[in-house]
Image (cartoon, rainbow, N blue to C red):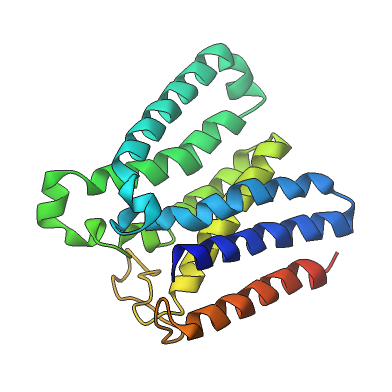
Amino acid sequence: MTGKSHKAIGTAAGAAIAIYGIRQGDYALALALVTAPLAAMLPDIDHGSARIGKLRKLMANVVVTLAAVAVVIAAWIHGRLILENNTTLLMVGIGVVIPTFFLFKLSQTRWVRDTWGFVTKHRGIMHTLIIPICAAIATIYIRDRNFLILTYGFLAGYVSHILADCMTVKGCPVLFPVSKKNIKLLNIKTGSQEEQIQTVILIIVILLVGILFPA
């Protein structure tokens, strides 16, 4: 699907979490709206034609550096606190930031490009469930609630991208590393009128989940 569709669907995913929070009187869940749209765009970092893909090298280098510095500084300043009482910063780094950009940076190495094309191609490793699974595991250990909600938003947005792309002709290799075969649920052509219709349907369904999910 196009970037606009992914962003709209990701925003709906964040909105669904926010709506559920409002129903619960838990307004902090609206924080999911911050990370969900961004995460919904992230998998296309492997696509040279996508807006995020055009800036992928610079962005990856900057983010990897900043993430590494942030984790080191946090560990140094809050060493005992992180180890004894609060694993939030550590788990955000280990479970979300580092896996995401490690996989991307790995795909840029010459050896990987020459020997394992799956990692470098569009709808390759960035369109699998590896990163969402890492993020889901991280949520078990994140204790700061704001970080936890931001991670929920990241998880929802990223999964929304994969789900949307699974409805296109090419599909996504969601079962990797068990299988590299692309799984597709429908045969929608990217950029077509069918995509626009399917985007609207997905947005409605996602929002209904937030509205109707048992309180």
Q: In this view of the protein, which residue sits in the foreground, 167 or 83? A: 167
Left or right of 79, for residue 60? left
Which quadrant of the figure has residue 67? top left
Q: Is residue 45 above or below residue 13?
A: above
Q: Is residue 52 above or below residue 174?
A: above
Q: Is residue 18 above or below residue 28?
A: below
Assign the C terminus to one quadrant of the image. Answer: bottom right
Residue 82 at what x, y percent from top left?
Answer: 60, 23
Left or right of 167, for residue 64? left
Q: In this view of the protein, which residue sits in the foreground, 152 or 193? A: 193
Residue 143 at what x, y percent from top left?
Answer: 68, 35
Residue 202 at what x, y percent from top left?
Answer: 61, 76
Assign the N terminus to one quadrant of the image. Answer: bottom left
Q: Is residue 211 above or below residue 133?
A: below
Which quadrant of the figure has residue 44? bottom left
Residue at 65 percent of width and 27 percent of height? 86
Which quadrant of the figure has residue 109? top left
Residue at 54 percent of width and 60 percent of height? 7
Q: In this view of the protein, which residue sits in the foreground, 154 or 51? A: 51
Residue at 33 percent of width and 65 percent of height? 123
Residue 81 at what x, y percent from top left?
Answer: 63, 18
> So how many labels did they put on this image?
0
Residue at 36 percent of width and 58 percent of height? 50
Left or right of 28, for residue 172? left
